[in-house]
Amino acid sequence: MFKNFLASITHNRMSLVGTAIAIMGLVLIISLFVMEQLGFEGGPYLGILTYLVLPMIFVTGLILIPIGAVLYRRRLRRTPGGQSTPLMPIFDLNQPKTRHWMMVFVAATMLNIVIVAGATYKGVEVMESVEFCGMACHSVMEPEHTAYQRSSHSRVSCAECHIGPGADWFVKSKLDGAWQLVAVAFDLYPRPIPTPLHALRPARETCEQCHWPTRFVGDRLKIKTHYEEDETNTELTTALLLRVGGEAGRKSSGIHWHVDRGVSIRYRSDETRAEVYEVEYTNEDGDVKLYKDRKAPEEGGSWRAMDCVDCHNRPSHNYQPPGSEIDIAMRDGLIDKTLPYVRREALRIIDAEYASHEEAREVITAELNQYYRDNYPDVADARADDISAAAMTLGDIYSVNVFPQMKVWWNTYPEHIGHETSEGCFRCHGKRLRTAERETISRDCDVCHSILAEREENPEILTQLNP
């Protein structure tokens, strides 16, 4: 029986090839696994190769072995005058030799199952890693991965927000990922990647695993530093008391009132969610109010229940406007604020489109040095190091916010929190949306924040906070 089985494997090319493939795949899996355990850093592609590609090759080889054996036996039976060979072997467990080989076969099968199961588990782990999401398709996901690394969620894995708990969304994400793999392989993906993601899992199943909208937060003080575009780069301060709010007792207040469990807010908008056509508000008593833009199309768009990402639309992939980035760099001392007109010139030079990061760094350095040579030659000579450091910082700022190969520019992905870089809050809290009785949604700024100081030099509030 086993002689026939071995003959059926070794006397046909398919089974021999399958055996060679399986052995090669197994040896490579074990070798790369050992290298990984010894600390070898191979980037995201090592995990893909070890736990995704090679296990598929190993399983393919195992499948080819019995297929080749069956085809070999079938060919023998159909050969004129050939020896008749039974299609299936007969296992007589009363014979010690048969029992011995059966144990070997079962042990080998169990070993293969363990190998495939372990590789599958590690493969899933690799596919849900940040390295896989952000670096395996580097040119495509570089903007999102770069912004993610600078965000407050940089220690939260991509899968925790984009997939969340449970098997159903895991399967759905992998099915979507199959098309994304095809799109990357054949260069079918759009540039830039369109947002918002309409198939994104509801925030109450992802964001609220960590953030509780029912928890009362209260007010938060926010201090913003800004620099004027004059020669001395005058430092100005804005102090805001953000009324984050939340649930206090039985009622919510402040900004997080929007996600109170007792109310329901739905809206109809265009595909970008930047233009809101209608807002439907249902209070805890079941009373409904419909606010509508009379100039909006009667049909089209889509209805959506409001949740966290309708305001926090860039929670982990936020691209700062150039002015804000320059203000932060000057505040932190990365750009020397005593350089004359450095804020104005930095914004002029950086708020432009360059073909690549390399070109941006070259042009930014050249233009900033040229400006000081032409207008402040003494400064150019005496403070060359400060100018060089400022140019390097501007190059860094450009490189983490603008990605020419993906057509991502300063204003490609506006943030809806507030109303500085986009219409933001005023998408709904404006004059356009009205009920049939011409009632508008509240535009009272004090509901969301109180302005304690607005672009002031040495505001009194800072003295009170830091006497």
Image (cartoon, rainbow, N blue to C red):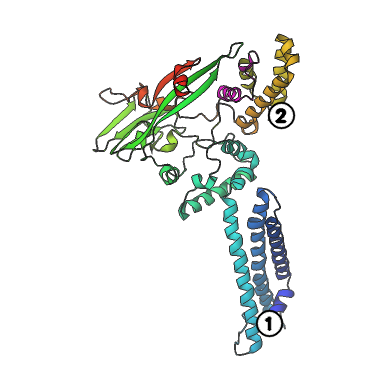
Secondary structure under tag 2 reads helix
Sequence-earlier tag: 1 or 2? 1
Rendered image quadrant of residue 68: bottom right
Q: Estimate the x, y position of residue 275 in percent, counting from the top left.
A: 43, 28
For the record, the magenta segment spans 322-343
> Is label 1 or label 2 in front?
2
Residue 358 — which label?
A: 2
Q: In the image, is 377 to the left or to the right of 106?
A: right
- The type of residue carrying mark 1 is Phe
Which residue occupies 48% across, 23% down? 466
Residue visible at 63% across and 27% down in the picture:
398
Within the magenta stretch, is there residue 315? no
Looking at the picture, tell me which residue is in the foreground, 282 or 57.
Answer: 282
Whether residue 234 sits left or right of residue 292 in the image: it is: right
Q: Is residue 421 visible from the viewing direction of this image?
A: no
Pick the front one: 128 or 14: 128
Amino acid on which the number 2 mark rests in the picture: Glu
Q: Residue 286, relative to residue 377: is it above or below?
A: below
Q: Residue at x 66, y 57 (%)?
A: 50
- Residue 2, numbered circle: 1
Q: Position of residue 262 (x, y in %)?
A: 29, 39
Q: Position of residue 9 (x, y in %)?
A: 71, 74
325 within the magenta span: yes
- Furthest-top residue in view? 375
- Residue 25 x, y percent position in the rendering: 70, 62
Q: Residue furthest right?
A: 381
